[in-house]
Image (cartoon, helix red, strand yellow):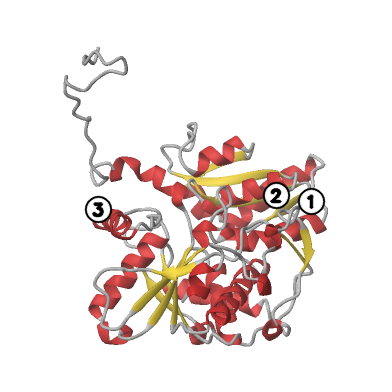
Amino acid sequence: MAGVTATGMAGVPATFSSATAQIGGFLSKKPYAPPLWATHLSPMPCHTFSLGHFPTPIHKWNLPNLPEGTEVWIKRDDLSGMQLSGNKVRKLEFLMADAVAQGADCVITVGGIQSNHCRATAVAAKYLNLDCYLILRTSKLLVDKDPGLVGNLLVERLVGAHVDLVSKEEYGKIGSVALADLLKKRLLEEGRKPYVIPVGGSNSLGTWGYIEAIREIEQQIQQSSDVQFDDIVVACGSGGTIAGLALGSRLSSLNTKVHAFSVCDDPEYFYDYVQGLIDGLNSGFDSHDIVSMENAKGLGYAMNTAEELKFVKDIAASTGIVLDPVYSGKAVYGLLKDMAGNPAKWKGRKVLFIHTGGLLGLYDKADQLSSLAGSWRRMDLEDSVPRKDGTGKMF
């Protein structure tokens, strides 16, 4: 397995070296050529910007209590960058290229108060000398208060994003599309040239980000030659990542079964939404045939039970992999519950989990995690410990 574990770690294989490895390659605009197996999809992007550090590594993940013969591997899209880490970067490479091509001087997007996508968009926009306007959803009690500087908000506000707050009730009544259109209209009246990016970057153009990720996985496997994955598992929050993975997997040589654990809306909502995304690329597929949706939202989006948070802590302590509580944590929690309840379904299978990032979201859960975190103590220093001057006294 040296080929897969080394990819993106010790060096980038010459056969698919990243543009970011070259001096001046990062943040550069480049022509886009799709995988051969995706050339019939349309519309097809013309260009991308190099915003992420790709390829991201794949390595074995020693999760506890797996069914007999089951292996879980992990693709570390949480390592696609620091400020721009996570799955959103792959979509933004295409979306920001389109914004620049259309002559935009600012971008608008929408998300929750700790949206990873909004943070990534704010950073990407500033990299490309664009202003960024964020419409963030929060509670009715907090909508008129300073949102603070915790987690993703800290990065967004440091890079100068304009933050507009709406309550969850307003968001539910008006909807993300109408909210973005309202702000777009106001900016147009001010003489600006705004470009709207949907929630999560999940539209048909953004879907190309994870079609491209499938090509990356395919090439990593070819470099290794001794591993084939039966399943790909990922969290689902807005649908674009799933659409790209499922479509790419079906069209490419991988042909793996894709499982999505939804962390907000119900599976049927996502089957319909993904259908719209792949129809927008004229794929000809039925979403029910290319992805299996499972419900993992629990208490609701960005809400966690004590058991889920303990699970995130236990996985970090036992494997070193830090999952975020909103997306990947719920997905792995759901995956292992399914493996425990249906061991025959997973027996002997090689599973690739896509870690979609979101580490900054942990800071919003610090109070809830405080009782679970590792212990600390004051170091016991006896009087006999010598000072630097050798007197033997501490003070």
Quarter location, residue 219? bottom right
Image: 224 above or below 54: below
Q: Look at 79% across and 48% down and name the residue there.
A: 193
Horizontal and vertical percent position of residue 314:
27, 57
- Find numbered disc 3 in the image and state the secondary structure of the residue it sits on: helix
**Neighbour tally class for label 2: few under 14, some 14-19, many 20 plus, Cα within 10 Å:** many
Residue 107: which disc? 2
- Find numbered disc 2 in the image and state the secondary structure of the residue it sits on: strand
* Nearest the eye: 288 or 130: 130
Residue type pointed to by label 1: Ala
Report the Cα–Cα distance between label 3 and label 1.
44 Å
- Residue that label 1 marks: 104
- Find numbered disc 1 in the image and state the secondary structure of the residue it sits on: loop
Horizontal and vertical percent position of residue 354:
47, 68
Horizontal and vertical percent position of residue 290:
51, 84
**Neighbour tally class for label 1: few under 14, some 14-19, many 20 plus, Cα within 10 Å:** some
Residue type pointed to by label 2: Val
Q: Can residue 266 be seen in this view?
A: no
Horizontal and vertical percent position of residue 67:
26, 80
Residue type pointed to by label 3: Ala
Between label 2 and label 3, give the one nearer the viewer.
3
CB of mark 1 within 8 Å of CB of mark 2?
A: yes
Q: Look at 48% across and 84% down and name the residue there.
A: 226
Q: Can residue 224 be seen in this view?
A: yes
* Nearest the eye: 173 or 93: 93
Report the Cα–Cα distance between label 1 and label 2.
7 Å
Between discs 3 and 1, the one toward the N terminus: 1
Q: Look at 23% across and 16% down and name the residue there.
A: 394
Left or right of residue 13: residue 153: left
CB of mark 2 within 8 Å of CB of mark 3?
A: no
- Residue that label 3 marks: 306
